[in-house]
Image (spheres, rainbow, N blue to C red):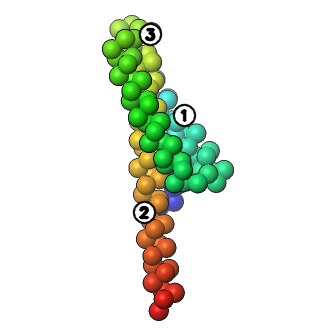
Amino acid sequence: MEAYEALKMAIDMADENYRTNKDDSYFSVFYAHKKKRLEKVLSQVENRMCMGFLLRELKQERLRFVDLSKEEAAHPTFDWYGEHYWEIVYDGKAAGCEAAIGILESALDQRDIGDSDDTKSKKQ
């Protein structure tokens, strides 16, 4: 499956999860930010950004969001009815990065397999 199509499906799934959980203070924020991060990646893929570069960038961002989430868990800057708002935001963004990383790695693997098949057929 092409990265574009897989990202669209992941966005649709995050949107469906958001709508299903829109009354839940944790999951509504989590899925909204996961969806936003996936939409940003889709935009970058649409603009023909190098997938290898984008993958490296996403891995760095995911680590940064995980670190920020841990920091918020330890020292919350905004407590929203007992929930640490920014921790949830960072968790959602990290989840969006994680989903996009899986999609892009799969797309790059498929492309490598296709390239090696083309190389084999050209040698014959």
Q: Quadrant of residue 99?
A: top left
For the residues marked 3 and 1, what is the alpha-carbon distance in whole angstroms? 22 Å
Q: Quadrant of residue 67?
A: top left
Which numbered disc, 3 or 1, marks the residue that appears first in the sequence? 1
Q: 74 or 114, which lies in front? A: 74
Disc assigned to residue 36: 1
State if disc 1 and disc 2 touch (CB < 8 Å): no
| 2 left or right of 25 in image | right
The secondary structure type at the circle numbered 3 is loop
Say whether residue 63 is left or right of residue 47. left
CA distance for labels 2 and 1 = 25 Å
| Left or right of 68, for residue 11 | right
Classify 91 as above or below 45.
above
Amino acid at circle 3: Thr
Judged from the image, the secondary structure of the residue bearing numbered disc 2 is helix
User: Residue, x 43% and y 16% (percent of image)?
Assistant: 85
Three-letter amino acid code at the position of disc 1: Lys
Q: Which residue is situated farthest in the left direction here?
A: 74
Q: Residues within 10 Å of mark 3 (few under 14, many from 20)?
A: few
Q: Residue at x 35, y 8 (%)?
A: 82
Query: Of callouts 2 and 1, which one flags the residue occurring earlier in the amino acid sequence?
Result: 1
Q: To which quarter of the image does residue 80 belong?
A: top left
Q: Tell me the residue at 41%/8% (across/down).
A: 79
Q: Position of residue 61 (x, y in %)?
A: 47, 36
Give the mark toward the camera: 2 or 1: 2
The percent position of residue 36, horizontal first and vertical second, equals 54, 34
Residue under label 3, please give it.
77
Label of residue 109 in the image: 2
Task: Reply above or below: 63 against 3.
Answer: above
